[in-house]
Amino acid sequence: MESWRNRKTLILGRTDMMGLLEPAEYVDCVEHAFRMHGLGRVYMEPKGHIVLDRYQGEWEVMPSYIEEPEAAACKWVSIREDNGKYELPAVFSILIYTHPETGFPLAICDGSYHTLMRTGASAAVSAKWLARPESKVLAILGTGSVGQGTLATCDSVFQWDAVRIWSRTQESVDRFLAAERPKFPHLELTGTTDVRTAVEGADVIVTGTHARRWLVEDAWVKPGGHIAALGADLKGEQELDPGTLQRARVFVDDIRQCREDGEIAVALSEGLISEDDVAGEIGKVIAGQLEGRQSEDQVTVFDSTGIALQDSATVPLEYERAVAAGVGVEKKMIST
């Protein structure tokens, strides 16, 4: 048996991470993360935040441990809203995957592609469990990386007749459509800069922006619609009309995070809803402990702040595939 002292750490860049898993596999991993969360078979604290006034953005730290399959990981996320002037993405991250028993760093990975896929997968999982089975029209608000992951993973859970894309500028819409249409020739992909045009009549709406004033008016959300709110994960951000939260059956990924940073946070702070108005965590639905959608006409909302378990449930399979494919660079981290 090889000594742990002789083991090497696998270092994986963004291009190494791309293509290791299929979109449906990201959905399966995230679904498992939520299920284990619902069963209480995890160790995880809410995201830690470091906010500096001198920079437009923050750091987030996200450690977690999951019992089965046993895994532990920690992600360090940098958010800098002005990074365009440096030709850098606004959000990027490093993911460290460790052996639970020894704490040995099995892999140090670029977390950007991993995060856009596992974040999109949270919307897909919520649609699978909370949207109406006959859902045919998908609206995606936001043409950044989360929009890409949302499209790829949601395509694996429903057969869509139409997918509508929204962004604030026509340039962003055109860029997204040019990049994504060749990947999804079976989908009718259209784009608009008008939010109402995108969401009115949609069966599933996924929001992935950092809006600080709601984008989606309650009147535009059809009876029986489902919304996955992915964007609001910083204090003060808001994508949905509070009226929607008041009439919908609302689920969250982790109530401790969502009450501080999620879509429900502003409505809670203003007294428009209370925690008693939140049906519960989606993991309880997946674990069979909580009823999801209750009627055809009921509006459902999933408030996703992104939980660290999505990382620890996904990176083991990514690591396994990377080793099998021979990608990345190995580095000995412990001296003999």
Image: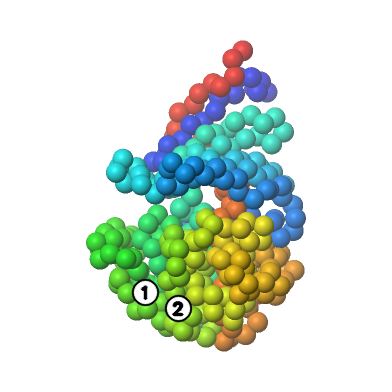
Q: Residue at x 65, y 34 (%)?
A: 99
Identify the residue at horizontal 49%, vertical 65% (top origin): 238
Query: Split into 4 quadrants, where in the image is the C terminus?
Result: top right
Q: Which mark is residue 27?
A: none
Q: Earlier in the sequence, mark 2 or mark 1?
A: 1
- Which residue is painted at 52% across and 68% down in the image? 228
Which residue lies under the disc numbered 2? 217
Query: Do we see residue 219 in this rendering?
Result: yes
Mark-to-mark CA distance, 2 and 1: 9 Å
Q: Quadrant of residue 328?
A: top left
Foreground of the two, 169 or 96 = 169
Q: Position of residue 321 (x, y in %)?
A: 51, 42
Q: Measured from the top left, where is residue 48 in percent x and y?
A: 60, 45
Q: Are marks 2 and 1 in contact (CB under 8 Å)?
A: no
Circle 1 SS class: helix
Viewer-nearest residue: 86 or 119:
86
User: Does residue 276 lie above or below 32 as drawn?
Assistant: below
Q: Which residue is labeled 1 in the image?
A: 195
Q: Amino acid at mark 1?
A: Val
Residue 88, quarter of picture: top left
Query: Please, is residue 105 above or below residue 236 in the view?
Result: above
